[in-house]
Image: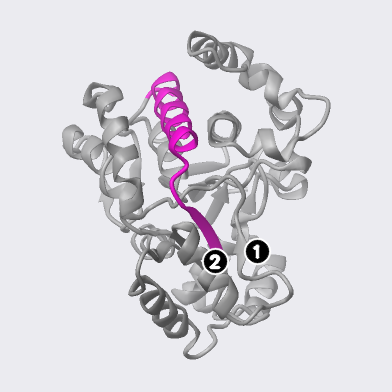
Amino acid sequence: MAKQTAVVVAPGRGTYNKAELGYIARHHADKADMFAQFDAFRAQTGQEAVTALDGAERFQGSKHTRGDHASPLIYAAALADYQAIDRDKYDTLAVTGNSMGWYIALACGGALSPTGGFEVVNTMGTLMQENLIGGQIIYPFVDDNWVEIPGRRDEVFAKCADISARADHILGLSIDLGGMLVLAGNEAGLVAFEREMPRLDDRFPMRLPNHAGFHTHLQKPVAEQGRARLGADLFGQPDVSLIDGRGAIWAPKACNQRALWDYTLGHQIYQPYDFTAAIRVAAREFMPDVFIVLGPGGTLGGAVAQSLLSANWRGMSDKAGFQVEQSATPRLLSMGREDQRALVTG
């Protein structure tokens, strides 16, 4: 088979759950040296080893979804997945990610070393957990066929504006995530939205456990702490193009490293993250044969597909059309799914 071009997508928080327990041990026994370095870093900070968390007898939501545990787990699994991609089958044109996935993308793309990326992820995940300012909820604006419901986005944003205008209420966009809007705010704002918006599929609005009010001004104190602990010298030139949470491209050998540090520990933390724009730019600017979504978990695949549909990529405009294309010529490969993983790793 001829070599294919790929854009790689790194996952964010919420992708390491009960089904993913043991993911690192199952898929990456050959990378023990790298995980030993990560565990050594955690030992210096008095934290439980990543391999011990992954190797626990049972999954504990209250433990494994904490920022100081989930972030390094997801980073270790996703970076190892990136290293496992068969380079004889795929040429990586660019790397992007969702939310925390931006840190992973930096490491995959070479702008951070594996250990430097781990330091960034572990530090920021720990700071998020220690501060735990605000929270997040998800609300969809597409129908079952992944087609946008007319007026739904406007309805959500109007409600956010209404709630935020009230005394001591904060609510706004956190992540534009394919067919979902991830909203963030303080407890008063979140509760008001949950109480006043129609309940959909008996699931939404869905509160995300152990998630702070990411990508809002609530996180400015966390950004300041991160900048104090993580120096710009950790950052270097990427080996492949990186697409950030604005849809901006950071090209190899052409990055201002100080600007990359400033965006990563500034705008990226306390301004909305436009994942949909990142995927749209990836599709239109790089025109890859496939999108490869790193594990753990396979939930991000839906958001990638929905983002591609909104960009009318390859003429696809709804879920049915995407499924027809996917069955004939797989365009989206999620490494968290065993059937698709085999196509990526060989």
Residue 329, label in figure = 1
State the residue at coordinates (36%, 62%). 281
Q: Magenta region: which residues?
A: 113-138
Residue 231 vertical position relative to residue 217 in the rendered view, above or below: above
State the residue at coordinates (32%, 58%). 247
Nearer-N-terminus badge (1/2): 2
Q: Identify the secondary structure beneath mark 2.
A: helix
- Return the residue nearer the eye: 183 or 99: 183
**Left or right: 137 in relation to 107:** right
Q: Identify the secondary structure beneath mark 1.
A: loop
Report which quarter residue 245 is drawn in.
bottom left
Q: Amino acid at mark 1?
A: Thr
Magenta stretch: dominant secondary structure: helix
**Left or right: 320 in relation to 3:** right
Of tags 1 and 2, which is closer to the observer? 2
Q: Quadrant of the C terminus?
A: top right
Residue 17: percent from left, percent from top: 71, 43
Q: Which residue lies under the disc numbered 2?
A: 191
